[in-house]
Image (cartoon, rainbow, N blue to C red):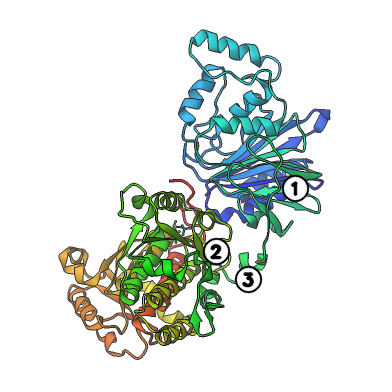
């Protein structure tokens, strides 16, 4: 979703901001802007330049601007309050334009604040919730609504004229940007990652955080802030992940950190050990293909160190073996693709550990009253570790007494920090909005968890766990085989689907769970409507959709329900469906009903989700490319969904 960058130092700020914003593009956005200090003529002003659309447009506009600024802030906006437009793009400014801010998150009480501020004479120029922040900081700084000189009287007059009780502005103003930001934050209910600059404090960026990520770093040529480490990794690998309620004041010569009262604090420095190459395309035409091709490595890396002395271990669980043994119910809570990883986990946990497992969309879980006891384990799955609904569900589950275990791809993310224990999926930075390699990392991690629960509950012997662990590792080579051999088959299948208006993904057992992920991938990047159905449910409704040429994409690998799935496909064939099947290598018979067959190597059914998903990812990508879509940045979607 939205992205923040900021820089103050001795280099040209505009280049650093644009490069940072480009790095944040993957998160999804609809407009972009920067605020740059401008000291021409000896008086510092703040110049704000904003554009609807891509960062490249903003870059072209800035190319024509002679901006010598060495301090500035930038933003990519994903619209929540107000449509994508110049006026709604960040940065937003105070009435007199001397303060500019960029903000990620949502201000829940913005309507009340806006009304209150308007009564005191503030003028608003956007529909955003963010803009109130600029005006609150302005009042705290100048003690008035309209600027350093004339405002105090105007504000007071507005109060008297309205006859309404409004909170008093901080007259005569603290004239300290960091203190003004702190004060503004006391008025705001909601989530924020915020960076502010002020023309009266050249070179200073004030930063605040609550429930929205902010990272800060010090490089050789200045101080940097961003909402994602990827935007500042060129400058430094040692970063401070700001905690909720912490503040930072960036200046060219250094950074100071304070708490909500303004008392100095010593921040924790985290070293980033992944390489920027991992976040670049590395010769692939798009990030999505690169990330799909990285999946064999993800399987291997996620398993490293898990089998020590012949025993499966997940030390980061944060639960003793005795506590694990007491677990009698598991909830997997997640959204989107991560939710689909949960569907696969349900099959494994119930089959191996015999513990009832429910999978719930975090957005639903948080508003239900689920049955939670101290022996309930809640597993929160999130690639980004930032998803607002998943975080809210974690908090709710913990209040109700559950142990919460996080599975995430991002070290130090809110999901990691707010869970009792965490497994990292070792996918490394995932850039394409459509999740691929993270999904594989999640399924492998959840498989490990299922095996551990089964071992602790004595449902599987140590020997059985060891054998299954070995086979789990074999899926790395099986994925590689698919990548090496099935390209043409996938291309042919994509040609058969590309002009459809809709498609059905079907399967049974594990295949039904995989079908969900196949359908999501196709719709999110190709904008082709797709739905997933348990194949046995087809005749209870969806079969009515099928007419000649309608694409049905089936997962029919060799499994205990293979024959049943084939019968369901025959019913589709009889109605003229165009059938694409993901089948097991060596299954020649399937070609009798399938128009197109994509093979995966023979694999135990329990692990088929890991391999059979790969052709579906590739199929979605091929269809999307044939339809002229941007596979890395699909419309309307964001990589991290940090709002409800
Ligand atoms: C995946 O392709 C989607 N972009 C989306 O469904 C995603 O999985 C979902 O928003 C959850 O994100 P998370 O894993 O970061 O919590």
Residue pointed to by mark 2 = 430
Q: Measured along the vertical axis of the image, is residue 605 above or below residue 249?
A: below
Q: Which residue is mark 1?
A: 223
Within 10 Å of disc 1 (Cα), the crowding (few <14, some 14-19, many 20+) is many
Residue 120 point in image, percent of width and height: 55, 17
**585 sits to left or right of 568:** right
Residue 24 against residue 483 in the figure, above or below? above
Query: Residue 332, how many percent across, how many down?
Result: 38, 62
Q: Which numbered dot is residue 282?
A: 3
**285 vs 568, nearest the viewer:** 568
Looking at the image, do the residues carrying marks 2 and 1 touch, with CB atoms under 8 Å apart? no
Instruction: Where is residue 198? Give x, y as percent.
Output: 71, 32
Instruction: Name the residue located 36 percent from the left edge and 79 percent from the top edge.
Output: 458
Instruction: Pick out the residue farthest to the front.
Output: 322
Mark 1 to mark 3 CA distance (whole Å): 29 Å
Image quarter of residue 167: top right
Left or right of residue 347: residue 112: right
Residue 73, numbered label = none
């Amino acid at each position: 979703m939205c992205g923040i960058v900021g820089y103050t130092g001795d280099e040209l700020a505009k280049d650093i901001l644009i490069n940072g914003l480009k790095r944040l593009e993957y998160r999804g956005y609809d407009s972009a802007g920067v605020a740059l200090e401008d000291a021409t003529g000896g008086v510092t002003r703040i110049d704000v330049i904003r554009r609807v659309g891509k960062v490249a447009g903003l870059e072209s506009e800035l190319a024509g601007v002679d901006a010598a600024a060495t301090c500035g802030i930038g933003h990519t906006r994903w619209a929540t309050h107000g449509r994508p437009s110049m006026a709604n793009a960040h940065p937003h400014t105070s009435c007199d334009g001397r303060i500019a801010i960029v903000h990620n998150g949502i201000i829940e009480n913005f309507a009340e604040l806006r009304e209150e501020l308007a009564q005191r004479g503030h003028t608003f120029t956007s529909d955003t919730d963010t803009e109130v922040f600029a005006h609150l900081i302005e009042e705290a700084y100048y003690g008035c609504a309209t600027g350093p000189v004339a405002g105090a009287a105007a504000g007071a007059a507005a109060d008297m004229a309205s006859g309404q009780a409004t909170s008093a502005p901080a007259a005569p103003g603290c004239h300290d940007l960091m203190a003004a930001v702190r004060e503004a934050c006391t008025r705001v209910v909601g989530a924020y990652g915020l960076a502010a600059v002020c023309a009266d404090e050249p070179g200073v960026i004030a930063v605040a955080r609550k429930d929205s990520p902010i990272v800060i770093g010090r490089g050789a040529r200045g101080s940097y802030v961003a909402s994602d480490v990827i935007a500042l990794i060129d400058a430094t690998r040692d970063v401070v992940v700001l905690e909720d309620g912490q503040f930072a004041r960036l200046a060219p010569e250094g950074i100071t950190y304070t708490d909500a009262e303004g008392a100095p604090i010593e921040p924790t420095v985290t070293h980033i050990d992944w390489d920027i190459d991992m976040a670049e395309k590395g010769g692939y035409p798009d990030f999505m293909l690169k990330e799909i091709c990285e999946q064999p490595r993800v399987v291997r890396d996620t398993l490293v160190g898990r089998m020590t002395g012949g025993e499966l271990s997940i030390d980061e669980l944060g639960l003793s073996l005795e506590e694990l043994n007491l677990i009698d119910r598991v909830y997997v809570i997640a959204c989107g693709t991560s939710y689909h990883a949960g569907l696969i986990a349900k099959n494994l946990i119930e089959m191996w550990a015999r513990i009832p497992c429910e999978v719930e969309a975090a957005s639903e879980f948080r508003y239900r009253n689920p049955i939670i006891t101290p022996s309930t384990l809640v597993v929160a799955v999130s690639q980004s570790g930032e998803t607002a609904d998943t975080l809210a569900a974690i908090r709710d589950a913990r209040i109700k007494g559950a142990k919460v275990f996080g599975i995430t791809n991002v070290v130090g993310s809110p999901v990691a920090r707010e869970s009792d224990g965490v497994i990292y999926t070792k996918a490394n930075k995932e850039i394409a909005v459509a999740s691929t390699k993270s999904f594989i990392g999640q399924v492998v991690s959840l498989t490990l968890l299922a095996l551990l629960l089964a071992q602790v509950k004595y449902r599987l012997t140590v020997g059985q766990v060891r054998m299954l662990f070995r086979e789990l590792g074999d899926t790395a080579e099986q994925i590689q085989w698919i990548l090496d051999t099935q390209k043409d088959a996938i291309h042919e299948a994509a040609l058969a689907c590309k002009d459809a208006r809709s498609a059905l993904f079907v399967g049974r057992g594990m295949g039904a769970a995989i079908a969900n992920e196949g359908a999501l991938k196709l719709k999110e990047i190709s904008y082709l409507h797709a739905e997933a159905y348990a194949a046995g449910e087809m005749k209870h409704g969806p079969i009515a959709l099928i007419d000649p040429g309608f694409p049905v994409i089936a997962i029919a690998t060799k499994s205990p329900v293979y024959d049943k799935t084939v019968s369901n496909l025959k019913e589709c064939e009889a109605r003229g469906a165009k059938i694409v099947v993901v089948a097991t290598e060596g299954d020649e018979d399937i070609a009798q009903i399938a128009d197109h067959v994509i093979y995966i190597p023979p694999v135990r059914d329990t692990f088929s989700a890991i391999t059979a998903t790969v052709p579906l990812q590739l199929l979605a990508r091929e269809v999307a490319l044939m339809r002229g879509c941007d596979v890395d940045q699909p419309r309307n979607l964001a990589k991290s969904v940090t709002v409800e």
